[in-house]
Amino acid sequence: MLRQLLRTLSERETWILLYATALLCFLSYHPSFGLLPSDCRPLEAWATKGLLLLATPLLFSLLVLREDPRQFGLGMGDARSWAKWLALFIAVMAAAILVASKVDRSFAAYYPLYWPARWSHGEFLLHAAVYAFYMFGWEYFLRGFLLFSLEKRFGSFAAVLQMVPFAFSHVGKPELETYSSIAGGLILGVLALRTRSMWPCFLIHAFIAIWMDVCVVYVWR
């Protein structure tokens, strides 16, 4: 038993999953460090999470895996291919979110997460910028580092593995969004693998999040 455990712990993918799990648990308990006033804590939390989700995988790649972090989806990949998919997904999701935010009022009750953005254009822009940075860290962690580091061992099944923490991160949000994240996370994972880049995933995810806020605050208000 001990020998099997030691053999398992010697595998590269074991340390990747242990690190990823520990980081997500840490962020659940310590979303921010209380540096800003309480009414700005959501912004601080997104900035903190975005920084840790971006910086710690980079350090883990260099210091533990001893691999170039740029190989984990940071490059532009097949930009001509993903640009077409990006346009298609944005068009589809723009229409879907426009309808969903009108029909399901739980979205209006939940978004935007930074409440001052409901009453001030400046606060809305600040919220959008910080939230986009958070999305970049989140996408690099999932559709960059985790996806491509696990691909070496699991192949395309890595798209399924990275989808699981993505879906669980939506628990507590509107129910329709949580279930949609299962399909969405899988589609984004496949898109990143096929285009060899996390950039289209970031642009799609950031657009979805900010467009939802626009619909709630400015379209259906």
Image (cartoon, grey):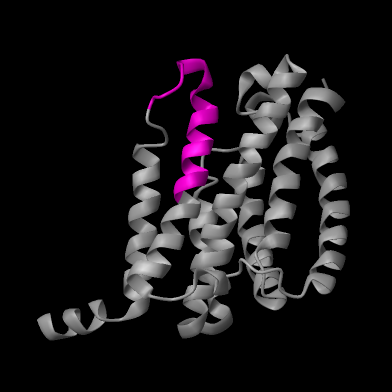
Quadrant occupied by the C terminus: top right
Q: Is residue 25 above or below residue 36?
A: below
Q: Position of residue 184 (x, y in %)?
A: 67, 58
Q: Residue at x 68, y 55 (%)?
A: 202
Left-right relation of 48 to 137: left
Q: Is residue 173 magenta?
A: no
Q: Is residue 144 above or below residue 205?
A: below
Q: Is residue 48 magenta?
A: yes
Q: Quadrant of residue 18?
A: bottom left
- 120 or 67: nearer the eye? 67
Q: Position of residue 24 (x, y in %)?
A: 40, 51
Quadrant occupied by the N terminus: bottom left
Q: Which residues are magenta?
A: 34-52
- 62 or 219: nearer the eye? 62
Q: Main secondary structure of the magenta part?
A: helix
Left-right relation of 184 to 156: right
Q: Pick out the residue farthest to the left.
A: 2
Q: Position of residue 12 (x, y in %)?
A: 34, 78
Q: Residue at x 37, y 74 (%)?
A: 65
Can residue 37 be seen? yes
Q: Quadrant of residue 59?
A: bottom left
The total number of labels drawn is 0
Q: Residue at x 42, y 36 (%)?
A: 31
- 21 or 76: nearer the eye? 76
Q: Residue at x 55, y 52 (%)?
A: 138
Can residue 1 be seen? no
